[in-house]
Image (cartoon, helix red, strand yellow):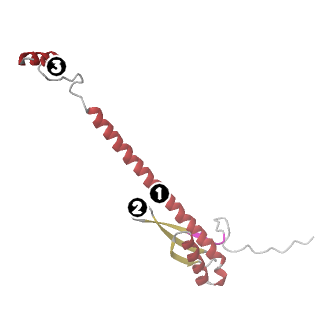
C-alpha cells in the first residue's frame, strides 16, 4: 500500500488522523460532579454516625447516673460512704465512672457520671438525684393539726 493511500484512509476516517469528540467543552465534568456528590454524601453520613454515637453515649451516661443514684439512695440509711460505694459500683457496672457523689439533708443522693465517647476523644457527663419528691406545692413544715370540733 502506498503512503498516500494510508494517509487518504486516515484522513477519510478522522480527517487528518484526529478523532473529534462530539461532547463539547464539558466532557468529563460529570465525573467531577459525581466525585463531589460522593464526598458530600460521605461527609454527611460520617457526621450522622458521629452525632448518633454521641447521643447513644449520652443516654448511657444518663442511665448509669440514674441507676447509681437509685442504688446509692437505697443504702443511704447505712451512711454516705456506703451509699457512694454502692453508687460507684453501679456506675462502673454500667460502663461509667462516678465523678461526684454527695448526699443532701433531705435524704437525697446526688451523683454525676462520665462516659467516654466511642467515636470521639471526649467524654459526656450526666447528673441524677434520688430521694424524696420535692414539689413547689409541698409546704416546708407540716400544717398544724386542728382539734376536732365537738359534735
Dot 2 falls on a residue whose secondary structure is: loop
Q: In which quarter of the image is residue 137?
A: bottom right
In reply to whether residue 124 is colored magenta, the answer given is: no
Observer-side mark, 2 or 3, equals: 3
Drawn side of residue 18 relative to residue 35, left or right = left
| Pointer 1 or 3: first along the chain | 3
Q: Mark 1 points at which residue?
A: 53
Q: Which of 20 and 137 is in front in this view?
A: 20
Q: Nearer the viewer, residue 37 or 150?
A: 37
Question: x and y percent of residue 107 in the render?
Answer: 64, 77
Dot 1 falls on a residue whose secondary structure is: helix
Q: Read off the magenta span.
A: 128-132
Q: How far apart are marks 2 and 3 (CA)?
A: 59 Å
Question: x and y percent of residue 2 in the render?
Answer: 7, 17
Q: Nearer the viewer, residue 144 or 13?
A: 13
| Pointer 2 or 3: first along the chain | 3
Quadrant location of the C terminus in the rendered image? bottom right
Q: Nearer the viewer, residue 20 or 92?
A: 20
| Pointer 1 or 2: first along the chain | 1
* Cβ–Cβ under 8 Å for marks 2 and 3: no
Q: Main secondary structure of the magenta part?
A: strand
Q: How crowded is mark 1: few (under 14 residues within 10 Å), some or many (20 or more)?
A: some
Q: How far apart are marks 1 and 2 (CA)?
A: 9 Å
Q: Name the residue under label 3.
A: 14
Q: Residue 92 carries which label?
A: none
Q: How crowded is mark 2: few (under 14 residues within 10 Å), some or many (20 or more)?
A: few
Q: In this view, does 23 lie above or below 57?
A: above
Q: Distance between the residues labelled 1 and 3?
A: 59 Å
Q: Name the residue under label 2.
A: 120
Amino acid at each position: 500500500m502506498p503512503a498516500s493511500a494510508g494517509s487518504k484512509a486516515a484522513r477519510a476516517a478522522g480527517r487528518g488522523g484526529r478523532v473529534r469528540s462530539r461532547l463539547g467543552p464539558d466532557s468529563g465534568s460529570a465525573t467531577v460532579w459525581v466525585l463531589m456528590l460522593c464526598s458530600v454524601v460521605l461527609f454527611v453520613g460520617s457526621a450522622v454516625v458521629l452525632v448518633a454515637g454521641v447521643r447513644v453515649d449520652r443516654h448511657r451516661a444518663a442511665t448509669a447516673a440514674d441507676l447509681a443514684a437509685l442504688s446509692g439512695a437505697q443504702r443511704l440509711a447505712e451512711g454516705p460512704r456506703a451509699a457512694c460505694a454502692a453508687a460507684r459500683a453501679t456506675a462502673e457496672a454500667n460502663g461509667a465512672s462516678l465523678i461526684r457523689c454527695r448526699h443532701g439533708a433531705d435524704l437525697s443522693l446526688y451523683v454525676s457520671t462520665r462516659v467516654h465517647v466511642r467515636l470521639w476523644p471526649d467524654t459526656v457527663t450526666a447528673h441524677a438525684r434520688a430521694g424524696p419528691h420535692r414539689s413547689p406545692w409541698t409546704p416546708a413544715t407540716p400544717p398544724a393539726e386542728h382539734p376536732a370540733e365537738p359534735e
